[in-house]
Amino acid sequence: METLFTLVPLIVFLPVLGLLVNMVFGGKMSEKAIGWLASAASGLAFVVSILLGLALWTGGGEATVVPFAEWIKIGTLDIPWNFRVDTLSVTMMLVVSGVGTLIHIYAIGYMHEDVRFKSDPGRFRRFFVFLNLFIAMMMILVSGDSYLMLFVGWEGVGLCSFLLIGFWYEMDTLGRPSWANSNAAKKAFIVNRIGDFGFLIAGLLMFWYFSSLQFGEVFGLAEEIAAAQPGVILAITLFMLVGVAGKSAQIPLYVWLPDAMAGPTPVSALIHAATMVTAGVYLIARSWPLYSLVPDAQYIVAMVGAVTALFAATIAVGQYDIKKVLAYSTISQLGFMVAAVGMGAFVAGMFHLVTHAFFKALLFLSAGSVILGLERGHHHLAHGHGRPESPDFGHDAKSESRRLESSDSGHHHEEAFDPGDMRNMGGLRKRMPVTFWLYLIGTAALAGIFPFAGFWSKDEILLDAAKLHPEVYVLLATAAFFTAFYMGRQVWMVWFGKPRHAAAEHAEESPKVITVPLMVLAGLSVLGGALNLPGVHTFGGWLEHTIELVEHEVHLAAWLEVSWGGLNPIVALISTVVALLAIYFSWLIYGQKPLEASQKDPLKRPLGFIFTGMENKWFVDEGYQTVFVKPYLAVSRFLAEVIDWRFWHDWFHDTGLAGTYQWLSRIALDRVIDTRGIDAFFNGLGELTKRISTSLRRVQNGFVRSYALAVLFGVVVILGYLILK
Amino acid sequence: MDLGGIPLTYYLVLSAALFTMGALGVLIRRNALIIFMSVELMLNSANLAFVAFARSFELTTGQPVFTGQLFVFFVMTVAAAEVAVGLALIVAIFRTKHSIDVDQMSSLKG
């Protein structure tokens, strides 16, 4: 079994191979071939991950480092590219490649239609190249044996995220020509850059004090350094938190994730819900030996996570876009995970990461199915009315200008039809029954209804929070209430009531290539809790090989001492009641009397400005715009126009440097040194030569006889000298 | 020391006189032909000196050495060649200038 570990580089290189083949030969391959090839590359990586998992399982679960290549070697600095196979990294590999493969398959169906609705079938291949690149980068991230390799993957997935958010870079989410999508991509990239800056500082500090970035060496030295310089570990962990806040969308850097929904839905599911955004949680779990040494940092992390969980959950209540609700839900759930790993409940956090990957991917992909259903309905409608303008199926309209033109003249889509707007939906359960049931399962899992996966993992987090930090527990439990509420609201608005738009009336169910991966994910969302059932704790035992669980000595209230094999019935009961209550409220408000077309949200009147705040994301984007972006732009403009252009360019360079130089060259050099010095010298030389030659030319008088006389004299002189000497 | 009853000094004096005449002829006369003849005079004065010295050497040492006579032949040969070239030049110059006055040949005057 040991030899299986040497297979680990394949998890990176299989997707790379897939993307290379698609890049080089994809132009001549059919869509199906491209899609299935990419899925196979990801699927084979999943198979390798399973083999690694089996090898670990049978081999006792000890971490193995597989040396792969020498990377940086300068003097004493030696950073190899090694793969680390332990229970934590294999867990991430399984999630990334497993969920990733399902999403690849789903995307074959999804992108087939998406590229046609947006009139550019040529982009199908590009999508799968990016998707495979993402899997490869994510694998580098989770399998690296040093913070530097992790950072390489970290940046790589950031790049893929940027590329895929801006996949339809020349239009907005409704397909109208605009830079909205590309701005969303830039926003994600720049906000992540701020986080990466923190991560980078953490890494440099680590290198400075530990002289190494290898996990093993850093963790080995951690206690020693913590004893010698207690501030160092605190600084490293807090700067790392900045990186986590960027990548895992925590306060204050979460603002990029909702905008990232501009990407195609499979991207939202894979990158912005299931895998990439959990990299921050993985980073903290991976750095557990550091975080365990500084309770202050742990507390800050936990509070950041908990506040984010509640804050994002409240915003989700006021959203109308089906994907935006899920985006804020993702931020909120990531808050749960970060809070968990911050408290030191690493198993609970990782467990929630896994189950969340299942049910959130399911929800996003189902939402994608709904959006496609509405697009189909809209398309059907447009054709039914005999309009000639809808996207021409099977017709290769690659020309961008043509698409922009056609959109300009308002032919492409009806101006404001938004297939993602829940106000355009309603009553879809009859039109799309399969997706409906799958969506319900995902909702139940997310809301934490027994016995779905989310129940078990969320409950573990809540129990740990109740034991360790009651204030975190209160925040998270409130967030759980909002979670169930906004999911209930979404379900009533999307699936029940009457269609509020003609497109919803004609929505069509998605094909099997889309629904089958959803069924697999739904199965996992139902059964995922079995990974770590109370009393058995398979997952906890599995991770214990990598993460030592530190038992905190805390004084517990009597009701918290009760334990049914690790499950506290009271905490479980509270969260179940909270969830059911929230769903009941949502039924009262949205289910009992379904929304009518163009009716305002029923919460708007009773809650007043609070709901306006939720609707507008508490004006955080506007706040950032005023506090950071606008002053930043003003400063940049000032620097560019006044400092750089007027002062630096006009005054310093033109007047100062060029003027002085010209003055010098004219006055000092041209008049003095050049004319009177160099020129005078060479002119004098010429004059001298001329004078000498003028006097000498008189000798050449042209008379042969005088030459003969000269010869004679010469001979006489020489002979005289020779004789008389 | 007997060169046909005439002492060596006589020969040398004659030779010097001839050479001086030749040199003066070259320096003074303007006619190219006369200059040539003067040059021949100088060459032959040298020849006379060569032969006289060679004979005198042979008589004093008793060794017959013909180096002097040999040189005379060389000088005569070279003189013949020189005359051939020189006359050709003079003919060519005469054709263009209709004169053989060397003072008129001063195109290379500086």
Image (cartoon, coloured by chain):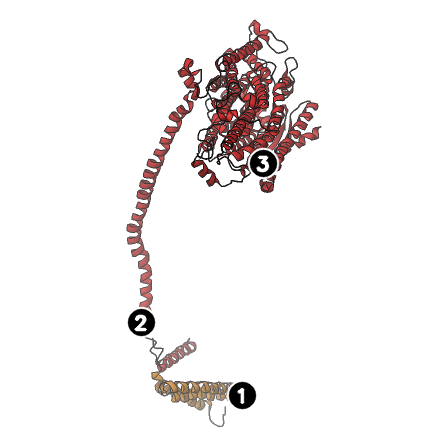
Decide which of A671, A56 is in the foreground and name it.
Answer: A56
Measure the C-alpha gap from mark 1 to mark 3.
101 Å
Q: Residues within 10 Å of mark 1 (few under 14, many from 20)?
A: some
How far from the left and from the top, in percent, is residue A646? 32, 38
The circle drawn on residue A224 is none
Q: Confirm whether residue A13 shows in the render.
A: no
The chain ID associated with circle 2 is A
Asked whether the beta carbons under mark 3 and mark 2 sit within 8 Å of each other, the answer is no
The chain ID associated with circle 3 is A
Which of the 4 quarters of the picture holds residue A58? top right
Judge whether A215 appears above or below B23 on screen: above
Q: Residues within 10 Å of mark 3 (few under 14, many from 20)?
A: few
The residue carrying mark 1 is B58
In the figure, the orange chain has which letter?
Answer: B
Q: Colour of chain A?
A: red
Disc 1 with disc 3 on a shared chain: no
Q: Nearer the viewer, mark 2 or mark 1?
A: 2
Kindly identify the amino acid type of the residue bearing the numbered disc 1. Answer: Glu
The residue carrying mark 2 is A695
How far from the left and from the top, in percent, is residue B48? 46, 89
Decide which of A56, A586 is in the foreground and name it.
Answer: A586
The residue carrying mark 3 is A71
Kindly identify the amino acid type of the residue bearing the numbered disc 3. Answer: Trp
Disc 3 with disc 2 on a shared chain: yes
How far from the left and from the top, in percent, is residue A433? 58, 22
Measure the C-alpha gap from mark 3 to mark 2.
79 Å
Judge whether A719 appears above or below A80 on screen: below
Q: Confirm whether residue A564 shows in the render.
A: yes
Measure the C-alpha gap from mark 2 to mark 1.
54 Å
**Element at label 2:** helix
Kindly identify the amino acid type of the residue bearing the numbered disc 2. Answer: Ser
